[in-house]
Image: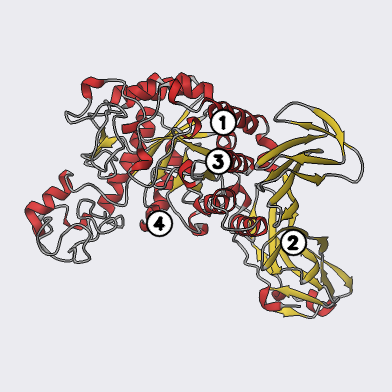
Amino acid sequence: MEKSAVYHQPCSAYAYPYDNDTLHIRIRTKKEDIQSVSLIYGDPFRSEEKEKGVWEWLSSQKKMEKIAKTDLHDYWLATVQPPFHRLQYGFVLTSSEGETAFYGDRGFLPAEKQTFTAADNFFKFPFIHEADRFKAPEWVKSTVWYQIFPERFADGDPSISPENALPWGSKDPGRKDFFGGDLQGIIDHLDYLQDLGIGGLYLNPIFEAPTNHKYDTTDYFSIDPHFGNREIFRKLVQEAHKRGIRIMLDAVFNHIGSRSKQWQDVVKNEEKSRYRDWFHIRSFPVKEGQNGNFEGKTTLSFDTFAFTPKMPKLNTANPEVQDYLLDIATYWIREFDIDGWRLDVADEVDHAFWKKFHKAVTDAKSDIYIVGEIWHDAWNWLQGDEFHSVMNYPLTQSIIDFFVEDKITASQAVSTINAHFMKYMQPANEVAFNLLDSHDTARILTKARGDRQKVKQALAFLFTQAGSPCIYYGTEIGMDGAADPLCRKCMIWDKDAQDREMLAFTKKLIKLKKAYHQILTYGRLTWLTLDDQKKMLSFKKELDGKALIFVFNHGKTAQKMNISEEPLLLQNIWTGETSTVRSVKTKAQHFLVLATPV
């Protein structure tokens, strides 16, 4: 038994309340080292008198289920409903060679009665508190998102376009180009988005700022005049809500624009500025071009986003800054009924502020959705008191590495995906914000070097995962584009220039996600086939006696895969055909979605 590989941590992703009555208990072991794990558990205060003066703790035993494996580890799960919402527990592990050991709060001990009678040997989950539990909006689980870069989606009101705006789509965008996209343009195409099946719009920043991307905010309480005004935005929210579409805005609270009144006051008044402590300033002057304050240089005299003096970093530990930002966050909920906040550069803002943010916005709207821009492991932001999700780029990369760029095998892809999801509590995985590309990455079609079949496979796999998938504007009609600024091209509205077949495919995929979101979200996942040589993988999701089977053939030739030893009645969800089979055949670079029972 490789004891050094065994891991468990109470009150973490290894032991957490799934709901008000249920605990999920996980443990990690070395891959294929342990043949079984039993959970020994009970209420810490329940005991019975076995003989006069001799009391014995009342416990139960439950076999744990192996739910995931990676290249290095196996993960086990037990679900328990403690009647008094408390739990004392430990594990009995049996190795592949038959060795048995107890594992608890004091490490490894012999699996014997003396061990089981000492309370100190066991882990504790003191109490399931509703206030501490991870909770997220239920509506997110069935929502398909659509990300819009407002300056490039549609020009609905040319009269407010910047004077230097270029003709729509007249060239590939440069970093400083404007084309006149605005909020009216989004309103004009809400019926298109509704027909596509979209349930949520994630908008890149719309507040007043000098650049086309608007991540250098000058006024968080004003809509950028080239995008519209408050009343146009109010109309957008109302019209979207009429169509069952939610609105999520982009909040840039890590930094502010250098043209903002607060920073300009610091530039002018230096140490005497009332806003001096709103920022992280090491020395004066802070004016760009002086005192080492040059674009891209490490000599800056104040903290910024990256190394750009145009985006000075806010001091979110300052109570005045906190009040200012929380007022902004609640204002757009209170006055315009937005449904979510996406938080830019979220990992560089202190946790204390995000906890206050979470309380403020959920008090303002209980089912608000909070997504942080974090590109890495984000377990400590997903404990229930900060974010509901992060932009799930680790999942993105696993999908791209296998389906798009052919960098890893099917086994490696599944290993990285399993490892990623085991980092988080299941309630967080159920509302994960999943994506393939965004304004910060090359477009998925460009990553696939124009191979549309690879894009279809990647999209299909994304949509079969638990969580809430997001489509970057134009993916559905075959738009391409390398990294910023080329990933921010103007949306193509000429139907003759659109990939209509890709559009039809995307609509079908969205319908599948919405029709089967219950089983996709809550279904028990079983990996069926991982064939590295043939580049095939398949898995099953089961819920309440029903199952969906997904078969992905990423190879260059058609392949047959066994489904069952006995003939099985299956329906091909994609084609609607029904047949009784033991095996299925999948075309090269295609996938199947099968349902059983019919």
Tag nearer the camera, 1 or 2: 1
Residue 341 point in image, percent of width and height: 41, 40
Seen at 82% across and 61% down, the residue is 63
Question: Residue 83, can we see it?
Answer: no
Q: Label 1 sits on what residue type?
A: Thr
Q: Secondary structure at mark 4?
A: helix
**Residue bearing the label numbered 4:** 347
Image quarter where the C terminus lies is: top right
Find numbered disc 1 in the image and state the secondary structure of the residue it sits on: helix
**Of marks 1 and 4, the one in the foreground:** 1
According to the picture, the residue beneath numbered tag 3 turns out to be 455
Three-letter amino acid code of the residue under disc 4: Asp
Q: Amino acid at mark 2?
A: Asp
Instruction: Work out whether mark 3 precedes mark 2 in sequence or the reverse, and give the earlier one.
Output: 2
Question: In the picture shown, does residue 246 fall above or below 311?
Answer: above
Residue that numbered label 2 is attached to: 43
Give the CA distance from mark 3 to mark 1: 11 Å
Q: Which residue is mark 1?
A: 506
Q: Is residue 31 above or below residue 286?
A: below
Q: Are marks 3 and 1 in contact (CB under 8 Å)?
A: no
Mark nearer the N terminus (1 vs 4): 4
Disc 1 from disc 2: Cα separation: 50 Å
Q: Nearer the viewer, residue 104 or 539?
A: 539
> Which of the pair 591/428 is nearer the observer?
591
**How far is the residue under mark 4 from the one under mark 3?**
30 Å
Relative image position of residue 368 (x, y in whole percent) = 47, 37
How busy is the neighbourhood of tag 1: few (under 14 within 10 Å), some, or many (20 plus)?
many
Taking the image as drawn, is residue 172 in sight? yes
Instruction: Kindly report which numbered mark, 4 or 2, lies closer to the viewer in this rendering.
Output: 4
Tell me if label 4 and label 2 are in contact, CB under 8 Å. no
Rounded to the nearest whole Å, what is the CA distance between mark 4 and mark 2? Answer: 38 Å
